[in-house]
Image: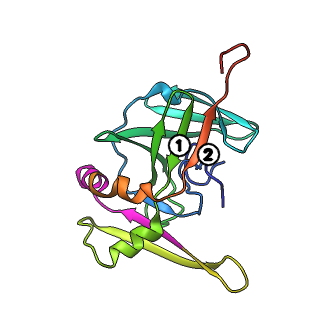
Amino acid sequence: MVRPRWGAGGAAVVAAALLAQAACQGVYSRTALAPVRDDRVVGQWQSVGDDDPFTIHREGDDYVVQPKDEKPTRFQLFRIGEALYAQSGGKPCEEFPREAECYSLGRLELATDSAQLFPFDTAAMFTASLRENFEIPYELRRTVGSAGPSSPRVENNFLLMADEPAVRAFLAKYGVRFTATSRAVRYRRVKKAGEAK
């Protein structure tokens, strides 16, 4: 498992990485959503509680995460209403091997000198899926591991198997709901020497 920073599942997503979620589980889309730019993410950052800074710069529609001594990873931003999301991934789709590509999703809140990444609460999403019709085709991969001698750990991965309008409609209805209950990954901007704190 990789503890998320900024970026795509499994690189070093969440950097995977932005989006390989903190619990090695998350929500993925078969379809990439049209990106937007928000250069507030550009600069040098640090995970709260982690001394190793990483930088983010923009290349076209992509934002490139460069951790120290690690390979760079890429992600894009998109909006659903007022909510800002990040997507990362592409090929191959490790979480759903039958898929040629997939994109890990997470909600992002940006302030001047701080940021919070909210992965999807897939346990809450699974519970809701038992009684609600999400009105979108999806695949659920559920695995049971061990968190200790007598406590199993269940991991849920959802793949949204629809075109962009349907994925956007799903996120408009459920995105904030199923990220509001998750534990945010927090970052702070690294100030340059002489810059006011």
Residue furthest toward the front?
197
Label 2 sits on residue: 5
- Estimate how packed mark 1 is, as few (under 14), some (14 to 19) or many (20 or more) residues with alpha carbons within 10 Å: some
Residue identified by numbered label 1:
116
Check the image and report above or below for 195 versus 165.
Answer: above
Left or right: 65 as drawn, with respect to 75: right
- Residue drawn at (36%, 52%) of the image: 176
Find out whether residue 168 is within the magenta segment: yes
Left or right, 48 with reference to 164: right
Q: Position of residue 165 (x, y in %)?
A: 23, 50
Residue 82 place in picture, x, y as percent: 32, 39
Q: Position of residue 110 (x, y in %)?
A: 48, 35
- Residue at the image position 53 percent from the left and 51 percent from the top: 19
Name the colouring of the figure: rainbow
Comparing labels 1 and 2, the label whose residue is closer to the camera = 1
Q: Secondary structure at mark 1?
A: strand
Residue 97 position (above or below residue 87) = below
Q: Is residue 95 visible?
A: yes
Q: Amino acid at mark 2?
A: Arg
Q: Which residues are magenta?
A: 155-171
Label 2 sits on a secondary structure element that is loop
In the figure, residue 195 lies in which quadrant?
top right
Instruction: State the residue at coordinates (58%, 42%).
Output: 6
> 10 Å neighbourhood of mark 2: few (<14), some, or many (≥20)?
many
* Residue 96 among magenta residues: no
Q: Nearer the viewer, residue 186 or 63?
A: 186
Q: Amino acid at mark 1?
A: Gln
Check the image and name the residue furthest to the top.
Answer: 194
Q: Is residue 100 visible?
A: no
Closer-to-camera residue (121/69): 121
Q: Could you tell me which residue is drawn at 53 percent across and 43 percent down?
A: 116
